[in-house]
Amino acid sequence: MSNGSGTGPCGACKFLRRKCVKGCIFAPYFDSEQGMAHFAAVHKVFGASNASKLLLTIPPNKRLETVVTLCYEALARVRDPVYGCVGHIFSLQQQAVTLQAELAYVQARISTLQHHHHSFPMPPPTPSQADVAAACCSNLSSSVCTTMDPSIDITDLCNVLDQQLDNSM
């Protein structure tokens, strides 16, 4: 930020190879070290002039959020020119749907096992099955859906629960 502090040009002006003047619209948001890489993406996708015009129309208290959004979208567009950040959002939505389906399946199997446990005596599970079942139940006991232990494979867990259900009938 050369704008009077003497620390050099901001990342945007450094990228554009121009003198950073006092009151540079980009200086508060693109520092001279990391800001250059972010501004390069913004410049490639939106153009420096368009980004500058956009920032000038935004109230100063909202500009930081605007710059963060511009940078996020620009970096996403550089990585995926067709879908941009929408591709990432879609991927996360698909992951959430898959995890919700897995959670619903496991909860249904646990409910079925609990119902059959009260109706029929179940043979004691082998230690490895007990460890897996205990780890699953401890992960599902909280009211907030948390990330399951990565060492537990959902398929193995469902197979163990299915075996226990078959053995109890």
Image (spheres, grey):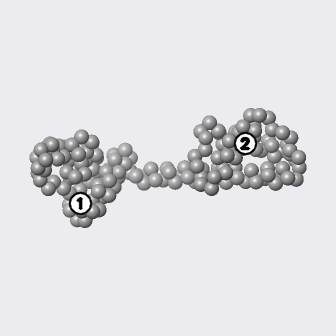
Q: Is residue 32 above or below residue 27?
A: above
Instruction: Determine the secondary structure under disc 2.
Output: helix
Q: Position of residue 27 (x, y in %)?
A: 19, 51
Q: Position of residue 131 (x, y in %)?
A: 72, 37
Instruction: Determine the secondary structure under disc 1.
Output: helix
In which quadrant of the rendered view does residue 163 lie?
top right
> Within 10 angstroms of label 1, few (less than 14), some, or many (20 or more) residues?
some
- Residue pictured at 69% horizontal, 49% vertical: 106
Please state if 71 lies on the left or on the right of 110 as rendered: left
Q: Position of residue 113 (x, y in %)?
A: 79, 50
Q: Which residue is mark 2?
A: 133
Q: Which residue is mark 1?
A: 55
Please state if 115 lies on the left or on the right of 97 as rendered: right
Q: Nearer the viewer, residue 125 or 99?
A: 125
Name the outermost residue toward the front: 5
Three-letter amino acid code at the position of disc 1: Leu
